Image (cartoon, rainbow, N blue to C red):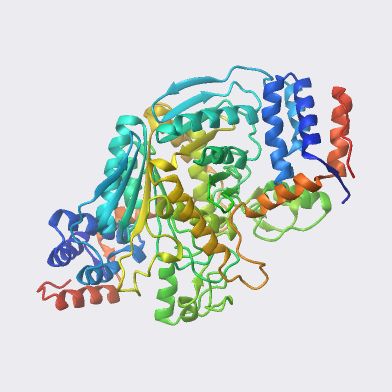
Amino acid sequence: MEYMHTEIKAFCNKILMHVGVSEANAKLVTDNLVTADLRGVSSHGVARLPVYIKRIQLGLINPNPNPKVIKSTSTTVLIDGDNGLGQINVTDGVNRAISIAQENGQSMVGIKNTNHIGICADYVLKVAKEGMIGFCVGNASAHMAPWGGIRPILGTNPISVGVPAGRFPAIVLDMATSTVARGKILLAAKKGDKIPLGWALDKDGNPTEDAEKARFGTVLPFGGPKGYGLSLLVDILAGVLTGANFGSKVPSMTEDFETPLNLGAFISVFRIDNFMSLKQFEERIEELINEIKGSPAAPNVDEIYLPGEIEHNRMQEGLKKGIGLDEKVINDLNLLAESLNIAERI
Amino acid sequence: MNEKLFTNEQLFEFGCEVLTRCGVSPENARIAADVLVEADLRGVSSHGVSRLVMYKEHFEKGLIEPHQEIKVLQETVSSAVIDGGNVLGLISAVKAMELCLQKAETGIYCVALRNSNHTGMLAYYAMMALKKDMVGIAISTAAPNVTPYGGKKPMVGANPLAVAVPCGNEPPFIFDASTSVVARGKVILAAKRGEKIPIGWGIDKDGNPTSDPAEALAGAILPMAGAKGYGLALAIEILSKVLTDSERNGTLMLAINIDKFLSLDRFKARMDEMVQNLKNSPSLAGFERVFIPGEKSIEKVKQRKVFGIPLEDKIVEDLDSLANELKVKKLTSRG
């Protein structure tokens, strides 16, 4: 069924505020989750709220963090997120990265001691809207084996880049470094569907089509050794360099309810006029987009898209017509409200 | 295929002589020859001394300047734009990274290199950061041989990304990968040898999957892992070409001073822990063990420094005729 984003947001805000998150912070989290649903990335949408709430209630996430600067230079900042919700910490980090870049040209911001950061596209899009190039990566619970390995040691660590594109919507690349998001395997397991070979291994390291077995095994890096290398790079920047947990030390967000995650994130912002005027850059980007969109499509392909274009289109439509949400997700949210003695239902 | 062995010193001397004969200053020739020999040592022979033949041709045609000043056009506390003066890309790229590393002392630095040429093995520049215990990143555009995802015409390069990160006791992390499913060089090689290529590497000029390397060369190479490789290739194209205001080869270098985040000792200890954790994890059937990106190349460099660098006979022949033309001493094989 379709739901208006305003209704979903108000409902999620209420839940977050009920467990102690301030109104301003609740809004940040909700906006990020609903943006994921609007972009059609439901694996990072409001479906994640119940686990956030559970972790807050168990004292594993600080609902109102007070992030502290550990170290800073004219171009870099290292932040202790005070175990806040990832969206709160990363929004704070992105804001700092933007203002440093505005002043000094380029910035890199590392964050440790944070939690699941939600959909990265949201953050780099914010940077692109400021007329700058944004880069954001984060590490995640270890669900992916290195290339040639069978034990999950790395997260599906996402990489995102946002670029302002003049009269076109910003180019937004946002991808996991696994072949497929683990959420899709969990979904297939729930429905009893088979998964294609190449997505995952079972716990003994055998390729499997059985989603249930894959759940207890490992997902695989995209493009083999290349995806493995990129995932490790993300963990080096977001985990090793920031002082956060890294590798197999990152607990599972959905299965370990005893330890705070201490995840890490890494953000970089580039001011374009360090290199050329924004106007000239946008003209060059428009030319590139026109070239690519105008190039002939492969057989059985209707149109060539830029990274983030399909998601942008979905979002524009969703803002008008509502977001299609799974009944199971709505049901879980309503149950959550009930358990918190909140009267409202979606 | 027959091969002959050469020492890295022999190849280095040869590279220096060829380049000085082409008009490059002795100092710059040494810079460029070192990049080429490092590629041969690491087993990336497609970017090694075999390229001298192409470079000489480019000098002759006036496509590359043997000697030009490299100028800093624009500078901030965190970035610089450099005009490479259309000299050999290997030289301007080394100078760009040198500047980047020097300026990153205060935190981070980014250098955009325009008016450059083929930069060879990108890992070299990222690895320059290791001597200063920094993180080095280099990205570059290649000739457009790769389709966008869903397209059938080559529109973007196989744009590579190289990153080097120091460890403590463990060898460094050195990642160097193109964003295409396979290097075009491998398809050319398959065509030469009359071998088929796996479906998924390339498409013919009408956009149909093909196992015929000649058809793929006339058509296009595909991005790695579909939409993801295309997205990465495009991000690199934007940062290293659009942003550097380059028409052909653009390169962007970045350096991160680790100490401005964590103390270097602590960072290195954490890197060692990560690396050991990966290396000691159980491996998949058919795999010897889990390797760290760059680990095999580091091993290869050690081997080749002792036992020599093998060059295919065809390459040696080409280098011999190059030596004849330029009247420099031919390479003598050590076995």
Query: Residue B257 in the image: x percent, y percent?
Result: 44, 39
Residue A7 or B27: which is nearer the viewer?
B27
Residue B19 or B271: which is nearer the viewer?
B271
In this rendering, the count of numbered labels is 0
Looking at the rendering, in which quadrant would you find the N terminus of chain A?
bottom left
Residue furthest to the bottom in view is A192
Q: Can residue B276 be seen in this view?
A: yes
A214 relative to A224 in the view: left or right: left
Q: In this view, does A118 lie above or below B25?
A: below
Query: Residue A64 in the image: x percent, y percent?
Result: 18, 58
Query: Residue B59 in the image: x percent, y percent?
Result: 73, 23
Q: In this view, does A144 lie above or below A188?
A: above
Q: Is residue B12 above or below residue B219?
A: above
Residue A317 or A243: which is nearer the viewer?
A243
A325 relative to B277 in the view: left or right: left
Question: Which residue is painted at 63% across and 38% down in the image?
Answer: B143
Q: Is residue B244 visible?
A: no
Question: Which residue is painted at 27% across and 49% down in the image?
Answer: A91
Quadrant of res A277 = top left
Query: Residue B326 in the image: x percent, y percent?
Result: 84, 23
Question: Which residue is painted at 30% across and 48% down in the image?
Answer: A79
Looking at the rendering, in which quadrant would you find the C terminus of chain A?
bottom left
Question: Which residue is painted at 64% across and 31% down in the image?
Answer: B90
